[in-house]
Image: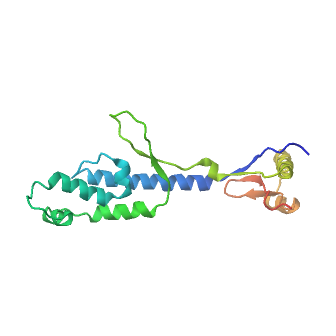
Amino acid sequence: MPKYKPMLIHFDDDGYNQAVKKAEEKINIFHQALTLARKDVVVDNLEEFSRSFTAYFKKAYYESNKEKIQLDISIDKLLYLMEVDLTRLQRLEKNFNLNTAPIDFIDQLPDDEEVLPFHRVDKKDYELYTTSSEQNEILRAGRNLIDAIQTASNYATIYPFNMGQATGNLIRYDVRKSKYFVNISGRR
């Protein structure tokens, strides 16, 4: 038996692109909340701000405005007296927290640059590899068969859906991408 080395069977482009899009939507929500909050307060710790938009805003607002009313009052009362409406920020925070996409912040940046979020979608999570030397042989045979079918399709009409049945589902046809693929999971 040949020495086993995992081979890439398939990369889920659609799943990866969907995860990146979801993460970018979360980053967009973050930027909207940041823009909204910065109208009234200084946001200097973005990672802390991302944990709770409203809690960070309330704390920062109270710290910057508690001298205006020289009474020891609660944050909520101060916001009420100053007529600050947190409804939109709360809605953005709810949408941000409902989005489960992983985002992260860069730790090492020069002092003059802001630490901005980026998506943490890993391509490896969307790759499928063989798990045995037998699967490697099946994958090679399937790829050779696909090459032969594609070459033959230059000279004759080949019906892709019949190929799956003719090969016992060793190869399948993806209609959306208009291409054949090796079906390892449906084998033995």
Q: Is 33 situated left or right of 178 in this image?
A: left
Residue 54 appears left or right of 126: left
Q: Quadrant of residue 112?
A: top left
Question: Left or right: 67 with respect to 174?
Answer: left
Number of marks drawn: 0
Q: Quadrant of the C terminus?
A: bottom right
Question: Is residue 151 positioned above or below 131 on the image?
Answer: above
| Picture residue at 29% right of the left edge, 63% below the top | 88
Residue 166 in picture, x, y percent from top left: 88, 60
Q: Residue at x 25, y 56 (%)?
A: 59
Front-most of residues 14 and 148: 14
Residue at screen point 38% across, 56% down: 51
Residue in the foreground of this view, choosing between 100 and 155:
100
The answer to which quarter of the image holds residue 175 is bottom right
Q: Position of residue 9 (x, y in %)?
A: 75, 50
- From the top left corner, tell me how far across and down residue 103 is, in percent: 47, 51
Query: Residue extending furthest front?
Result: 72
Instruction: Report whether 138 appears left or right of 28.
Output: right
Using the image, determine if residue 62 lies above or below residue 2: below
Nearer to me, 129 or 49? 49
Q: Residue furthest left?
A: 70
* Point 82% across, 51% down: residue: 132
**Which color scheme is applied?**
rainbow
Residue 63 on image: x %, y %: 19, 53
